[in-house]
Amino acid sequence: MTKFTKEKKTAFDYIGENADKISEIHQLIWRYAEPALREYKSCDALVKWHREEGFDVEEGIAGMPTAYVATWGKGKPVISTYTEYDAVPETAQEPVTHREAENPWQAGHTDPHSALGVAAAAGAHAVKHAMEKHGLKGTIKIFGAPGEKICISKPYEAAKGYYDGLDATVAWHPRGSTTVMYETQWGSYWCVAFVFDCDQPETWMSYAPDLPVQTRAPGALDAVCLMYTTTKYTKESMLPRTGLWTINEAILVAGQATADNLPPRIGVITYAFRSPSLVQQEQIYKVLLNNAESVAKVTGCKLGIKWVAKTRTGLFNKALADLAYENLELVGPPEFTEGDKEKAREIVRGLGYEPPQEPYNEKLTPPDEWERMWRKPIPNYQTHHGSDDYVEFTWHCPTVWIQVYVPSVSVPGVRLPAWTRYALCGMKGVIDKSIYTAGKAISGTMIDLVTDPAKLKTCKDEWKERTSRYMEMPLLPPDMEPPVDLPWPEYITTPRGREWHIPPFRFKQVD
């Protein structure tokens, strides 16, 4: 069992002494609510904080303007964590006990990644403070990881060598329980954009040159619509129905407005697909590609393919997971005040239901218990499900994914609207309890890895043994650039003020 050492006391005290600042920075990022690859203000706020804490920061890494790596210390061991800070379109909500959003289509924090980034940074800063005070040797790295909702940053950071030389990674995520991800790890996530460009519509009637052209090429709008429906028809040909695999589409451009008889020139549809294995991912892509090539021919379009992300599957490290859970036991689960609980009850009463007396989960969930719950919906033979791009770290070093409960309220037999969770996770004071818990759990685990070489060696020996059996190689080539040019939604400033906007697509030659 891990001990409460003087180094951990220093780290935990640091988080307590800086609680107000940590809370304020979370409020800042929660309200920025910037979506994937457009987290400019959020990234700047975290970078500024790292520098204030004495970290050296390299910005714009791996070809992404909102990615960074912050480094403090020198030599071994090299222990890392990461921040996330992207929000999700169409989930805007004010931190109040009723439904309220000026523009419900703009982005909001759902998980929330605002808390994820701030707690991870606080934990790493606390470790740096303890290492300075107690003369500990080693290096702390914090990776700024934008766009987790499209699983984009970590595959590119990994492919370009930023994770080389790491000795361990201690990560976390807001969840419905306070525990650690255990044996059943996240699966693989791939995302690809199919770009349909009707660049030569005049050739559509070339088979009858002596006939006056009275029709137009179907064009890119038809291509997107056909791709959407064709894939729906062929979904059963991609994978079995078991195992909670998913495939989701997003139309980034659906043909531009045209006049006269001109065909829509450009259409872009992305497909994000999750499955438990890379073999299954290849099968999904095989069907998608066949559909896209056929649709391009039918509609008179040129097909371009632009990869957004490709992750591997997660690799379990029991030694590090057990160590992290011991630190969670040391810290304890989030404990909420009566005022925090009344906020949840007020939401429920406003929806017309009887509020629960104890709305929050204020207990630890042992890893084995979590594992049983996590596996319930999947077949016995399946070893992965869902997805998160943190899995890229697991192939570079021992990695753990700590889970900490964030406030959410439920009513038996009733499915409450999602905004209730978004609101609670933005409320100052309420969400802070989860942030402090996560920050302390991260710092305690990191300190064990820095101060106890034997524990780190046990984690690394297990990692080496597991990777010796098989190694999933990086799926993105080092020279591949992330698709920051695709028309991801974002905020703009006009004479009317700050607005939620879906930008035009600047077409470039696709891969």
Image (spheres, rainbow, N blue to C red):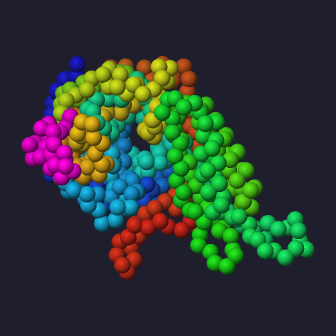
Is 86 rendered above or below residue 234?
Answer: below
**Left or right: 245, with 322 as reference point:** right
Q: Is residue 265 magenta?
A: no
Rendering coords of residue 8 (x, y %): 19, 32
Which residue appears at 45% of the width and 35% of the height?
A: 386
Image quadrant in which you'd find residue 301: bottom right
Which residue appears at 56% of the width and 62% of the height?
A: 253
Image quadrant in which you'd find residue 105: bottom left
Q: Nearer the viewer, residue 275 or 29?
A: 275
Is residue 200 at least partly visible in the picture?
yes
Q: Is residue 345 magenta?
A: yes
Rendering coords of residue 236 (x, y %): 61, 36
Which residue appears at 37% of the width and 80% of the height?
A: 495
Q: Please state the extent of the stretch shown in magenta in the rendering.
A: 336-361
**Left or right: 325, with 284 as reference point:** left
Which residue appears at 37% of the width and 61% of the height?
A: 106
Q: Which of 146 and 189 is in front in this view?
A: 189
